Image (cartoon, rainbow, N blue to C red):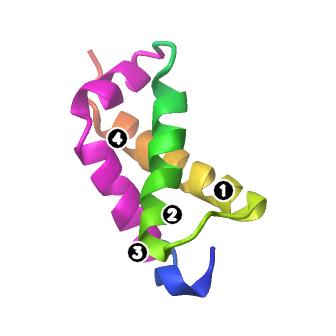
Amino acid sequence: MPSDTGGDATLDAVLAKVADAHPDRVAGWIRNEPGHWGFFAGQAVLAVRQLIGRRLEEPERRLVWHRMWVVLQERRRREPQG
């Protein structure tokens, strides 16, 4: 990720806000419903693009997708198992 984002902590905070803004989508992702990962992948890239003020390069996009996946996995881990 470019140095102008402030590192992984800032990136994860931005991505956590993306997840927080869409709890229904998080729930759908946890249930493995189609379309939810694509939604989050796109929203994550848009949020980071807005943060840094430019388009992301391919390696940056891949990092953002990876960190979004980690954020969502943490949400899944915290979900009560029923």
Residue drawn 43% across the image and 41% down it: 72
**Residue type (three-letter) at the residue carrying disc 1:** Arg
Residue, disc 3: 10
- The amino acid at mark 2 is Arg
Comparing labels 2 and 4, the label whose residue is closer to the camera: 2
Q: Quadrant of residue 75?
A: top left
45 shown above or below 6: above
**Mark-to-mark CA distance, 1 and 3:** 15 Å
How far across and how far down the image is residue 24, in percent? 25, 25
Give the crowd class for mark 1: few <14, some 14-19, many >=20 residues within 10 Å: some
Read off the residue under disc 2.
49
Which residue in the structure is indicated by mark 4?
A: 75
Residue 25: which disc? none
Magenta stretch: helix, strand or loop mostly: helix
Relative placement, left or right, of 57 versus 81 is right
Dot placed on the residue nearer the N-terminal end, 1 or 3:
3
Which comes before the other along the chain, label 4 or label 1?
1
Q: Which residue is mark 1?
A: 61
Earlier in the chain: of badge 2 and badge 1, it is 2
Residue 82 is situated, as x and y percent measured from the top left of the image, at 26, 14
Q: CA distance from mark 4 to mark 1?
A: 21 Å
User: Up-down: is 56 above or below 38?
Assistant: below
Residue 74's place in the image compared with 57, above or below, is above
Residue 29 placement, left or right of 4: left
**Which element is circle 4 on?**
helix
What residue do we see at 76% from left, 62% from top?
Answer: 59
Q: Is residue 52 left or right of residue 63?
A: left
Residue lying furthest right? 58
Query: Which residue is drawn at the image coordinates 44% and 44% (left, top)?
Result: 43
Q: Is residue 33 left or right of residue 79?
A: right
**How many angstroms separate mark 4 from mark 3 (CA)?**
18 Å
